[in-house]
Amino acid sequence: MSGTATTRRATPFSYAVIILLAMLSLGPILVMIATSLKTKPEIFSGSFSLIFMPTLENYRAVLGDSQNARYLTNSLIVATVSTFLTLVFGCMAAYAIVRFRFFGRDVVSGGTLLMRMVPPAVLTVPVFMIWTYEFGLSNSLSGVILVYTAINLPFVIWILQSFIAQVPPALEEAARIDGANDFQVFFLVVLPMIKPGLAAAAIFTFRIAWNEFILALVLTNRFTRTMPVKVSLFINEHNIEWGQIMAIGTLIAVPPLVFTFLASRQIITGMTAGAVKG
Amino acid sequence: MPSRHGLNRASPYFFLAPAAAVALVGLVYPMLRSVWLSFHEWSIGTPPESARFVGLENYRWLLADDSFWISVGVSMAFAVAVVILEVVLGVALALVLDRDLRGTSLFRTIFILPMMIAPIVVGLIWRFLYNEQFGPLSQALKALGLPGIPWLSSPDMALISVIIADVWQWTPFIFILALAALQGLPASAIEAARIDGATRWQTTLYIKLPLIAPVIAVAALLRLIDAFKVLEVIYILTEGGPGLSTEILSLHIYKTAFVSQQLGRASALSNLLLLIVLMLTLLLVLARSLRERRAGKE
């Protein structure tokens, strides 16, 4: 945000507006974190307050429950493995689309855009049926990993294309002249050059897989459940343990929040790129 | 480099193979299966081979079903409301804040936080905020001496409450894009208008807004497509209720399939939702190519 000749100077009013907006964005998240650090009487006291003695009791209760520990582990496995697979397969496919002219190229690149738009709810019924009755993948983590890899691939392929296109072809030519084959060129020359793109893509896929709910709800059982599924079951119990459920919510929110602070620039690029270029 | 040329020809297919295999198994085949299933009647617990072919019966049933049309109406109302509110608020804020502010990168980071956390967690947060006994919103109203609002318990209010949560989460998306577009405008155009004696208001209305309109149009379409995908936040907040007042299509699919266990009908429903999203996507492609053509001319 450089100050061009036309950018007006900031006034106290503009600072007041932007600080108010920041408070609006942060407020509800802080309410969750604060509630997760409160005791039950404090939550139900009838006067919400941000001043209280924080307690880790809710976290102790949540993490002390072996089921929750298992669901957190499941979430972690599913998100990590599917992110890894999506990145490996995605960057190879993106390379093929950017650097090679081949039969079916337009179909592939048009198809990635269309498939990016498929609502997960649309996949629930057929994937449930196929995984259960044809592939024998129901209630397994591999089943969830497979569908997460599939839904994330189109986005990763698309975002990596622009990074690969920026690698100077002369570098690849030089490697070829030195006797490298296409695969050596890709893994030894191109991949190291697109590390920032891979990082951005990794953050996006991890986040989507970590946050995903409806497919996991349909495809898992009480052993293979992920954390978001656990939340949905927990909140429909009669006496909602607000302290504990907010602790779970905070635990689920931590990885995306950490990523955001570590790599906000890449995230904004990835998030807004869809609107800026096709 | 002996077999270079032979390898070269086949290389793109080797590079594509793993991704293509996953996409075929995990996306293309399920969608074909969904089309197949929409012409059948099948119940959970029986092998798919036992499904009975019913032709267009599922679609005919859907089109005659009131709850389907209610759900279509809810989806449309939700999508249109969130897109309009988010675009108006986001663009207005961008115009107000298009200034040489310090700390903008920190602010931007804060603004994207609601979009980054899991939708299921967003649902949790708002369900707590909306709680009529001890939720912070109700308490604030009480402290001001105002009557309580039945945020999630009245059919009229529930849809509005669900819309508010989405506006909280996604307005920053439009705001960030609009601000970036404004700050990327050529200084010369705005200078020229000013020299011609345009007021600040006229510059905004006749120079700035038309110049950022293409970016905003594409962003609004992206939001519109996303609005038809929303499921988690509403699932946690209201589960579609009270009654059917917040039962958007994606939730209606889930309930038809896994609560009423009518898989064939749920597939027909899925295909209709997919059709809506695909049409919006084509519109998006069109909007982008129009914009690129316009950008090319300048």
Image (cartoon, coloured by chain):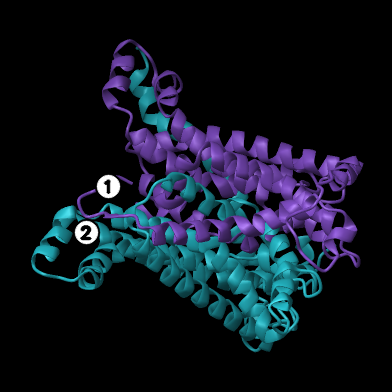
Chain colours: A purple, B cyan
Front residue (pair B205, A132): B205
Asked whether the viewer can see residue A113, the reply is yes
Judging by the rendered image, the residue that carries numbered circle 1 is: A3
Crowd around label 2: few <14 · some 14–19 · many ≥20 (10 Å)? few
Q: Which residue is mark 2?
A: B293
Circle 2: element type: helix
Q: Amino acid at mark 2?
A: Arg
Total numbered badges shown on the rendered structure: 2
Residue at the (76%, 73%) spot, across then down: B262
* C-alpha separation, residue under disc 1 versus residue under disc 2: 29 Å
Q: Is residue A123 left or right of residue B219?
A: right
Residue found at the very far front of the displayed protein: A12
Kindly tell me whether residue B236 is visible in this rendering. Answer: no
Neighbours of disc 1 within 10 Å: few (<14), some (14-19), many (20+) = few
Please state if B274 lies on the left or on the right of A127 as rendered: left
**Dividing the picture into quarters, in which one does residue B139 lie?**
bottom right
Query: A120 and B99: which one is in front?
Result: B99
Classify mark 1: helix, strand or loop. loop
Q: Amino acid at mark 1?
A: Gly
Residue at the image position 91 percent from the left and 65 percent from the top: A239
Across and down, in percent, residue B36 comes to 63, 66
Q: Is residue A93 above or below residue B198?
A: above
- The reply to the same-chain question for discs 1 and 2 is no
Q: Position of residue A24 (x, y in %)?
A: 57, 61
Which chain is mark 1 on? Answer: A
Identity of the residue drawn at 28% across and 26% down? A169
Residue at 89% across / 58% down in the picture? A40
- The answer to whether B87 is drawn above or below residue A141 in the figure is below
Residue A132 location, x and y as percent? 78, 53
